[in-house]
Amino acid sequence: MNFTFPEDKVLQFGTLRQYSKVNDEENFDLIDIFSPKNNQIQINGVDYFFTYLDESGSNKGGNSIILKLYIAQKINASEPVYGDPDSILKIHKFKKKKYSDKSQKRFEREIQALCMCKEKNFENVILIEHSGECNIFNHKNKDFDKYHYYTMEFAPFDLKGYIEKYHLNLTIDDKLNLCIELSKGLKELRLLGLYHRDIKPDNIFMNSIGVLKIGDLGLIDDRNINFSLDKIAEPIGPRGWMTPESMNKYLTEGKGFTFNYQCDIDHQSDIFQLGKVFWYIFQHNAPIGIIDENDFNLKSGQLYPIIKTMLNHSKSKRFKDIDEVIQLLKLEQNKLLKAV
């Protein structure tokens, strides 16, 4: 599904802006959200008004432009009131090249992975709606450049925001449910041979009907593809949530050191990152360094041993498959039910 932005909308410093030229002076202003008819696009026959994800115009995505989409017929264009958007639009902020570079290939692979998940009707991976190319005017060349994009379901919270707002209301059972849903999302990716490699609270979303979803698949890898987009010694994953093997890759890969270290980032790496997220759900902080049972505030049950096993530095001591984690979490849940 391809579409075109109005000619007065251009990219400037990674942000979509309103372009004007007065007396040979070029202006790049933030778009005026109170003039929605000037911010209108059509995707698959539906007219949308677009606004920024954040009122400041800043983007959450490092290599992406993220906008909110509102079905135009639902908005009073004369006195616009914006509530929850109907969809989220994510655009790769680098124009499409004839021969894809690494950044473009990763965005293309992200779309492919999301489409695979949609075909399987997966419940705990963010839902992609449309994808294709969009045209954005290049004021220097006086022509349109093409960019990859996709739209996805709206989620009012990421996990970090959800925990910060509702942590006082969450019971142990509620938190276990969050962990089980996330584990199911990881299992869904596993069934397709996909490794997420970028799991952190900011990349996990609570949708409008309260279902937890794994999103931001920009670093996705596929065990069924016989080539990698990773560079030698490239750091893969978010700071503070990186796996031991990702750090090994960054520090030792291709350096010719005497000792060899595990540098493969795979399903067990996702389990490690998910263990960090579980710790955050229960503790509201991150397990950095050597952790001890005394660091875990919840003293009853087997939650600490489960998370500790997920966080083992050595893959050989971690769970081999997320199914093991799901089974143990459900056992903990059943124990809670019996204790009530």
Image (spheres, rainbow, N blue to C red):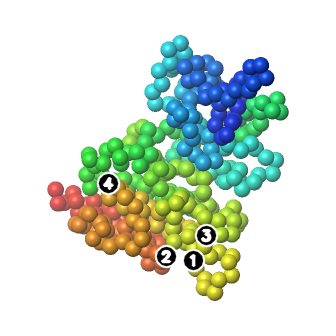
First of labels 3, 1 by sequence position:
3
- Name the residue carrying label 4: 175
SS at mark 3? helix
Give the amino acid at mark 4. Lys
Give me the C-alpha separation between circle 4 and circle 3: 33 Å
Image marks 2 and 3: residues in contact by CB distance under 8 Å: no
Of residues 148 and 19, the one drawn nearer to the viewer in this rendering: 19
Give the residue type that dot 3 points to.
Tyr
Residue type at mark 2? Lys
- Counting residues from the start of the chain, the first of labels 4 and 3 encountered is 4
Q: CA distance from mark 2 to mark 3?
A: 17 Å
Q: Nearer the viewer, residue 289 or 188?
A: 289
Q: Which amino acid is tagged 1?
A: Gln
Instruction: Give the alpha-carbon distance from disc 3 to disc 1, as whole Å.
Output: 11 Å
**Regarding mark 1 in the picture, which secondary structure is present there?**
loop
Query: In x, y percent, where is residue 42?
Result: 65, 26
Task: Spot the residue most to the top.
Answer: 78
The residue sitting at 58% across, 23% down in the picture is: 32
Q: CA distance from mark 1 to mark 4?
A: 32 Å
Q: Is residue 261 left or right of residue 309?
A: right
Q: Does 315 sit above or below residue 129?
A: below
**First of labels 2, 3 by sequence position:** 3
Give the quadrant of residue 93. Answer: top right
Residue bearing mark 1: 262
Q: Earlier in the sequence, mark 2 or mark 4?
A: 4
Comes first in the chain, label 1 or label 4: 4
User: Which residue is disc 2 drawn over?
Assistant: 315
State the separation of the CA atoms marked 2 and 4: 26 Å
Within-10-Å neighbours for mark 4: few <14, some 14–19, many 20+: some
